[in-house]
Image: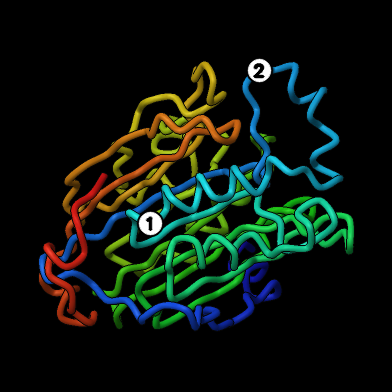
Amino acid sequence: MLRRWVSERAASLCDAQVNPHCDRGSLPADGRLRLLSFNIQVGISTERYRHYLTRGWQHLLPHTGRAVNLQRIGDLLGDYDLVALQEVDGGSLRSGFINQVEHLAQLGDFPYWYQQLNRNLGRLAQHSNGLLSRLQPNLLEDHPLPGPPGRGAILMRFGKGREALAVVMMHLSLGARTRTRQLAYIRELVGNYRHLVLMGDMNTHANDLLEHSPLRDLGLLAPQVEATFPSWRPQRCLDHILLSPSLTLERVAVLSQPISDHLPVAVDIRLPDELRTDLPLALSESERGTPA
């Protein structure tokens, strides 16, 4: 039944947008890849629960502080190779008609970017996910997720065949039943890949994802256990970067950057040798700088 549903709801094959203002990226010679997932809440700063009420108008109207927050986010992103963004605006009244994914690609000097529009409210709001990448993907797919409109996943593939690296960026629903359907859909997408990264705002804890969801048979690891929400007093671990055991974990951190109502999650991984041969190698460690 699910396979038929996936087939009927075919993904959109798409191309990453190219940032003409920076050089094309490539994998460092040591095979290390630096990943970040961040729910940026369309550039709104939230520091107390009451701000959801007092600053709620910023979800509808432009605000001068948004540009400052986007600059802070852009400064942060420059240290990473692959970034998953959730709650991004694709260019509407509230963002000053700025496509925030494209803008952050420019601020972070990313050669490739993609905006997934999940809820189109015209000039009022362009609810989106976004990806930023220093590597050009071999495959890029846009997947609306099951349930009420407004949630989506982006599948990227680097390399070829079973030894390719598959990365899925997502923003899952709040409701447990709908989230289970969405995870079942994602499970079907990645079933043939050995090297996996799943990243995004998953709106549930790692234990639920690894032990009680349709992902439980994949053997994924959840290296990050620190809370990410709310950013001013983190109590719940909702944002994750899940890895297959074939990828070597080198660093994991929840960054103390209370720009949004979520904190960003960062992971450094080292790719297996067989995967590196399918990806372009270029910059040495000294050329690309050291991680923050």
Measured from the top left, where is residue 18 in percent x and y?
51, 81
Question: Which is in the foreground here, disc 2 or disc 1?
Answer: 1
The reply to whether discs 2 and 1 touch (Cβ–Cβ < 8 Å) is: no
Look at the picture and state if 148 lies above or below 190: above
- Mark on residue 78? 1
Measured from the top left, where is residue 44 in percent x and y?
68, 38
Q: Quadrant of residue 210?
A: top left
Q: Nearer the viewer, residue 27 or 279?
A: 27
CA–CA distance in space, label 2 to label 1: 28 Å
For numbered disc 2, what is the local secondary structure?
A: loop
Is any part of residue 128 visible from this angle? Answer: yes
On the rendered structure, is 237 left or right of 24? right
Q: Amino acid at mark 2?
A: Arg
- Tell me what residue is drawn at x 60 percent, y 71 percent: 142
- Tell me what residue is drawn at x 29 percent, y 42 percent: 221
Number of residues whose C-alpha sits closer than 10 Å to that of mark 2, classed few (under 14), some (14–19) or many (20 or more): some
For numbered disc 1, what is the local secondary structure?
A: loop
Measured from the top left, where is residue 270 in percent x and y?
17, 58
Look at the picture and state if 242 lies above or below 98: above
On the rendered structure, is 186 left or right of 134? right
Q: Nearer the viewer, residue 218 or 18?
A: 18
Measured from the top left, where is residue 212 in percent x and y?
47, 34
Number of residues whose C-alpha sits closer than 10 Å to that of mark 1, classed few (under 14), some (14–19) or many (20 or more): some
Q: Which residue is mark 2?
A: 48
On the rendered structure, is 30 left or right of 104? left
- Tell me what residue is drawn at x 50 percent, y 77 percent: 140
Sequence-wise, which precedes: disc 2 or disc 1? 2
On the rendered structure, is 92 left or right of 85? right
Q: Amino acid at mark 1?
A: Gly
Q: Quadrant of residue 97?
A: bottom right
